[in-house]
Image (spheres, rainbow, N blue to C red):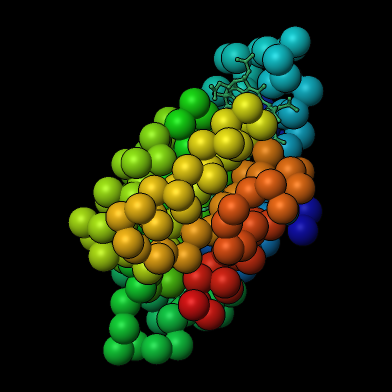
Amino acid sequence: MANVIRLAKLVEAGENNEAVAEADRLISQGVPVKEIISNGLIVALRALEEKCTTENFQLLDVLLASRAMTEVIDQVIARKLENAMDQISDLCIPKNPDTNTTKTLVIGTIQGDVHDLGKHLVATISKMSGIRVINLGKDVPPEVFVDAAIREKADIIGVSSLMTVCLPAINEIRILSMKKSIQPVIVAGGAAVQQAKHKYIDVDYVAFDAFDALHYFLKI
Ligand code: B12
């Protein structure tokens, strides 16, 4: 736990090279990916909350921490484990129990919102667990989610929103899906969705974090 706290401090301080080295060391010591993500990366970004409000916006600090988190995800968690899928169960990432079918997830951050770290994390661990992932990026209009779901024959649409003002656009995804006669499972995540009353958001599931999301995807 002590080393994961050190990782969190390095990410929070935006020390990307040292954060990558620390995460690398933790992985080689066999520390579960879940612990690195939940107690290291997510804790670090949550600690930045007061630096990123509408009134108090310390852009550089938050951007440096965001870069450190992205580099740990891409350079350590995704890349290092890419060729070691057999280790994944030991590292606490559940795998698709049905090896005959591959689920497809179309994922993005909703229109008007540029927060993409949580969505990137969900996309990365979903890919590692054997799900086919189409990542549409950030600031994605509802119709782009639906068109991609049709084109890619997706089972799941994953939508992220950290901005309360962007929540109404999420409901458009169901409306457009029905108009175009598709019935994807719609799963949402992000602070704004989690805080909203579920009855106002027309989705099948609101995921608490990336692991909760993955468990749900694998049950579909
Ligand atoms: C980092 C950050 C930024 C960075 C984002 C960098 C990036 N590349 O993403 C930058 C500096 C760009 C930024 C900008 C802004 N931000 Co900001 N930001 C944050 C901060 C501090 C952390 C967010 C984060 O990345 N957390 C870490 C990730 C891993 O956690 P997560 O996103 O919650 O994701 C997990 C789960 O929610 C879930 N999940 C997430 N997405 C999905 C999707 C699916 C499909 C599923 C299944 C699950 C899932 O799984 C993830 C992993 O476990 C939050 C504070 C907070 N508590 O969220 C504010 C916060 C989101 N920002 C906020 C604000 C106000 C802004 C700005 C408007 C500031 C400004 N004055 O301009 C702008 C937004 C511009 C825009 N149009 O989008 C507010 C939003 C308030 C609201 N409720 O509307 C917050 C809540 C801060 C606050 N307390 O006021 N921000």
In the rendered view, tell whether residue 63 sits above or below residue 19. Answer: above
Residue shown at 47% from the left, 43% from the top = 172
26 vs 58, nearest the viewer: 58
In the rendered view, tell whether residue 83 sits above or below residue 202. Answer: below
91 vs 6, nearest the viewer: 91
Image coordinates for residue 107, horizontal then vertical, percent: 41, 51
Residue furthest to the front: 179
Q: Quadrant of residue 216?
A: bottom right
**Left or right of residue 219, residue 62 in this image:** right
Residue shown at 53% from the left, 43% from the top = 170
The answer to whether any part of residue 122 appears in the image is yes
**Left or right of residue 64, residue 9 in this image:** right
Image coordinates for residue 175, horizontal then vertical, percent: 45, 49
Q: Quadrant for ligand 1?
A: top right
The answer to whether any part of residue 119 appears in the image is no
160 vs 42, nearest the viewer: 160
